[in-house]
Image (spheres, helix red, strand yellow):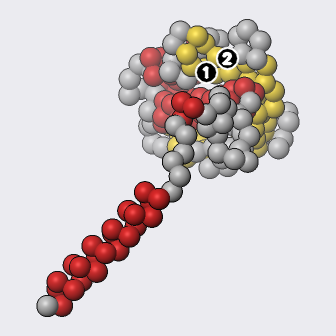
Amino acid sequence: MMQSWFSIAGLILVSAGLASCAAETPRPSASAEPSGASQPPNSKPVLPEEEASRAALAAYELYWQISEDAGRAPREKDWRPELAKAMADPALTDYVNEVANLASVPAHTVGRYRRAPKVTSVSLGQPPRVVVTDCLDATDEHLVSDAGGRNLDNPDQPRRYEFEAQLVRYPNPDRWLVQQVQPRLEKPC
């Protein structure tokens, strides 16, 4: 008896809810709304500069992910195809040469840079270009010999410095790539 009471009560609640939904006035379909009205109220449209900044920062993060992977295992494979997913020349060839140099020593990196990237310039000309300025902190990143694990860090190189990357939007396929990098060792941050 108790089981059927809960079933009947549940049906009544569901029916009441459906009846109240049916009594609401119908809203116009999305096709009947004027263009631009589909955005939620109080939301601002995304500006092209903001969209470019977000896309370039995402590409910059991919650049760091792949380049750090290559630095940790420079002899693992030919890194050029992987690095080309995030870089274009001249940055691509420069970093491929750096990875080849690590492999020839032989050495690899351990740890990670701490970073604080921010977009400092956006140009929507042709081609669109974004400049990212970062503060690299290499306190936890080290160059280590493959033979014996000896630390090969240059003691004269600063551990915190400014780093600038220029990213360009390439049309085919449509993607942002790091084209130029400039470590500014003389500019601590």
Count of residue discs? 2
Closest to the observer: 81 or 38?
A: 38
Please indicate, yes or no, whether residue 134 appears anywhere in the rendered image.
no
- Above/below status of 170 relative to 37: above
Q: Quadrant of residue 44?
A: top right
User: Who's the residue at 57% across and 32% down the image?
Assistant: 32
- According to the picture, the residue beneath numbered tag 1 turns out to be 176
Image coordinates for residue 64, horizontal then vertical, percent = 58, 34
| Secondary element at tag 2 | strand
Q: Amino acid at mark 2?
A: Val
Image coordinates for residue 188, horizontal then vertical, percent = 84, 41
Image coordinates for residue 28, horizontal then vertical, percent = 55, 40
Left/right of residue 28 with respect to residue 12 in the rendered view? right
Left/right of residue 173 with respect to residue 132 in the rendered view? left
Q: Quadrant of residue 96?
A: top right
Disc 1: CA contacts within 10 A as few (<14), some (14-19) or many (>=20): many
Task: Point out the image quarter for the C terminus.
Answer: top right
Closest to the observer: 29 or 89?
A: 29
Q: CA distance from mark 2 to mark 1?
A: 5 Å
- Above/below status of 161 relative to 98: below
**Is there CB contact under 8 Å for labels 2 and 1?**
yes
Left/right of residue 136 with respect to residue 6 in the rendered view? right
Q: Amino acid at mark 1?
A: Trp
Among the two numbered marks 2 and 1 on one chain, the one whose residue lies closer to the N terminus:
2
Residue 168 badge: 2
Q: Residue furthest right?
A: 187
| Secondary element at tag 1 | strand
User: Who's the residue at 73% across and 8% down the image?
Assistant: 126
User: Who's the residue at 54% across and 35% down the image?
Assistant: 30
Closest to the observer: 97 or 35?
A: 35
Disc 2: CA contacts within 10 A as few (<14), some (14-19) or many (>=20): many
Image coordinates for residue 148, horizontal then vertical, percent = 45, 42
